[in-house]
């Protein structure tokens, strides 16, 4: 499958959303709203839940399926209020010793004038800094689009996994093509160059694993069959989260922080050193 096909799959409106994952993976979910400073941002959805009998904090980007839902959730593009809300939930989880599980699916943070006026860049930067120092396990699942700082703002985690058809990149293929070739129509070529697929990123050491989507095609017309297929995916995600929690729960707060720091500081060090040497030789 070509990279652009993965991009289109990641954007499919019929893919499960954050609400689907919460409904099928967790119990006793209690939503929490607001950042205590501004307004409620519907594009970040989260709260407290139970995962196999243990309390966790779960949150993620929220998109809609209908035009009305998309407008309400701003197409999954949070403003600064959304990132402040996410951080509030994560700091609360740290206070009470709850693991944090985040689901990433966003085309990026909202780039509007109002968002910039109210501190978009500062809110994301603060999340990156604060998440680096949180003393409980953080697990991230990239379920659809994972674009730019809008994704990373809730993804500084000890373990990062991607669904097979998800993407994770610094910007969209259209944006990349517009910058590099001044032609957004070259998105197919850009998608190949960007190395944004789960397989690419696993090879670079950016993610810790790929969750298979085999048997979860969205081309089925039977709603019942779709539910059955989704259940297979939820089961695989459940297994991956359980495995990650088992590995991380024995680490001390200091070990979790060090693990997270080293993970993001040394992404595939050998690869980076090798490509840097090659670039220097061509200068």
Image (cartoon, helix red, strand yellow):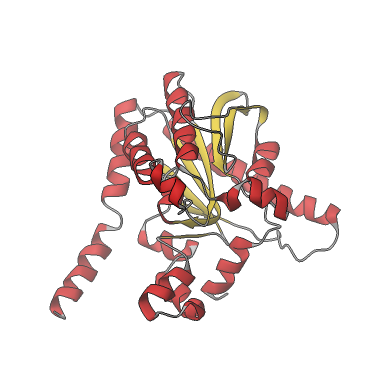
Q: Note whether residue 109 is visible.
A: yes
Does residue 228 appear left or right of residue 117 in this picture? right
The residue depicted at 38 percent of the width and 41 percent of the height is 119
Residue 250 % position (x, y): 40, 28
Name the quarter where the C terminus is drawn. Answer: bottom left
Front in this rendered view, residue 128 or 178: 178
Note whether 53 is above or below 178 in the view shown.
above
The residue that appears at 51% across and 46% down in the rendered structure is 78
Residue 246 showing in the rendered view: no
Question: Residue drawn at (68%, 29%), measured in percent from left and top?
Answer: 27
Q: Quadrant of residue 217?
A: bottom right
Q: Position of residue 77 (x, y in %)?
A: 53, 50
Where is residue 124 drawn, in percent x and y? Answer: 38, 43
Judging depth in this view, the residue of 177 and 105 nearest the camera is 177
Residue placed farthest to the top in the image? 96
Quick one: 272 or 118, which is closer to the camera? 118
Measuring from the top left, give residue 106's x and y in whole percent. Answer: 53, 53
């Amino acid at each position: 499958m070509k990279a652009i096909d993965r991009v289109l799959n990641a954007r499919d409106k019929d893919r499960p959303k954050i609400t689907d994952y919460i409904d099928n993976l967790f119990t006793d979910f209690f939503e929490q709203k607001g950042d205590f400073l501004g307004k409620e941002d519907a594009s970040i959805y989260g709260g407290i839940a139970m995962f196999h009998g243990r309390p966790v904090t779960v949150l993620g980007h929220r998109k809609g399926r209908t035009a009305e839902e998309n407008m309400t959730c701003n197409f999954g593009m949070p403003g600064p209020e959304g990132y402040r809300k996410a951080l509030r939930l994560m700091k609360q989880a740290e206070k009470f010793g709850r693991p944090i599980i985040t689901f990433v699916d966003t085309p990026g943070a909202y780039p509007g004038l109002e968002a910039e006026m109210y501190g978009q860049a500062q809110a994301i930067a603060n999340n990156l800094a604060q998440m680096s120092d949180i003393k409980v396990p953080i697990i991230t699942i990239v379920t659809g689009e994972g674009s730019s700082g809008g994704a990373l703002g809730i993804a500084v985690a000890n373990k990062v996994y991607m669904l097979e058809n998800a993407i994770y990149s610094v910007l969209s293929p259209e944006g990349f093509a517009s910058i590099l070739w001044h032609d957004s129509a070259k998105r197919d070529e850009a998608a190949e160059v960007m190395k944004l697929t789960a397989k690419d990123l696993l090879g670079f050491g950016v993610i810790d694993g790929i969750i298979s989507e085999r048997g979860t095609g969205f081309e089925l017309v039977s709603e019942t069959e779709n539910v059955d297929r989704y259940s297979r995916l939820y089961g695989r995600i459940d297994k991956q989260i359980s495995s990650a929690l088992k590995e991380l729960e024995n680490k001390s707060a200091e070990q979790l922080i060090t693990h997270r720091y080293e993970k993001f500081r040394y992404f595939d060090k050998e690869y980076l050193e090798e490509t840097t040497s090659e670039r220097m030789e061509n200068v």
